[in-house]
Image (tube, rainbow, N blue to C red):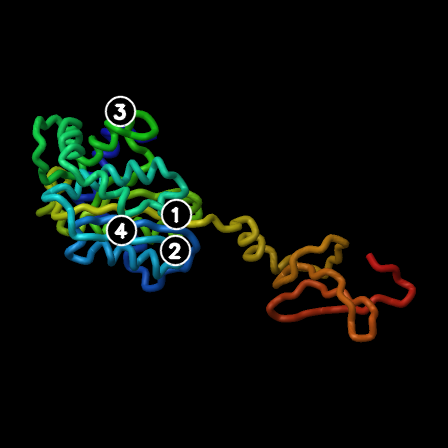
Amino acid sequence: MHDLTSLQTVTKTIAATGWRAEWAGATATPKRKGNYLVADMGAASGTAARAALMMLESGLAGSELLSHDQLPNTCAYNSANWAMEARRMGRSFFEMTMERIREYNTPAFVQLGNADIGIDSTVARLLTGDNILRIVSANNPDGAGQAPSWMAPPGPINLYESYFRRTLLDPQEHGVVHIMVVNETPVFDITENANSADMPGSHWFLAAWFIEPEQEALARVERWWPALARPVFSASPLPVGRDRVSPPHPSKDGSLRRASLDTPCTRRTRRLRADEPPI
């Protein structure tokens, strides 16, 4: 679990450095299976659509809930509530509907959000990433008042791009629903944006995604063990494929033929003798 202070520190660090991660310069994005959701009721700039396209091109399937009917200055309030709704929905987060996200786009939720950050008003303000964390922490579905360890710190679009690429590449990030409130304005300059975590961003939206876990153990065996391959036969019907043993199968004359390990360089087979019982 992260406490609110540590999340705020991470947010400030991200804003100061722009977090130009090593993945940001990647020229090829690996294909993965999974789901995504992008929600934005003030999608005028196309940044949210760009975020969705990045996930779509990576092989994920999902939906974009985009419209232009957001109440003035409510993007941060909406995104905070959408993030909590995605958390409550769990693995089915991508089934969120436009009707559902519109329920939060009201003065009532603006007033509740203002109360969470200590403002007695029904008027929407331009909120910061710190404000968003406070709203989500106060209403955390996992426990009111707890820091949302399930949510990435709110940050700029370039942070989202770096973070998303990392989740594609790192198997430890697979099998987890990632939820992030994203600002459409990138942050790069260290000196001019050192305190930008305390400043309101131009526009916030929600991005959430899930990458299906792979069979990492099998992948490691295939990478590390080919050099140890020997033609070992088994009675078990193991999967057929590269560097695995194939089960017995009949040849054209009806006798059994069992293939040995198939490697990129060679394939060896032998015919069972007439007096040799099948294994």
Cα distance between the residues tagged 4 and 2: 16 Å
Mark 3 and mark 4: Cα distance apart in space = 29 Å
Q: Amino acid at mark 2?
A: Leu
Instruction: Say which label, 4 or 1, has the lower sequence index.
Output: 4
Instruction: Using the image, tell me which numbered label, if any, was put on residue 65.
Output: 4
Residue identifier under label 2: 60
The three-letter amino acid code for the residue at tag 3 is: Gly
- In the rendered structure, are the residues bearing label 4 and label 1 in contact, judged by CB atoms less than 8 Å apart? no
Q: Secondary structure at mark 2?
A: loop
Q: Are marks 1 and 3 in contact (CB under 8 Å)?
A: no
Q: Nearer the viewer, residue 103 or 268?
A: 103
- What residue sits 21% from the left and 47% below the top? 205
- Disc 3 crowd rating (10 Å Cα; few below 14, some 14-19, many 20+) is some
Label 2: few (<14), some (14–19) or many (≥20) C-alpha neighbours in 10 Å: many
The quadrant holding residue 225 is bottom right
Residue 270 in the image: above or below residue 69: below
Question: What amino acid type is highlighted by mark number 1?
Answer: Phe
CA–CA distance in space, label 4 to label 1: 17 Å
Q: Picture quarter containing residue 3? A: top left
For residue 77, above or below residue 214: above
Q: Which residue carries the number 3 mark?
A: 145
Answer with left or right where residue 161 lies relative to residue 247. left
Tag 1–tag 2 contact (CB < 8 Å): yes
Q: Quadrant of residue 150?
A: top left
- In the rendered view, would you say 153 is above or below 33? above
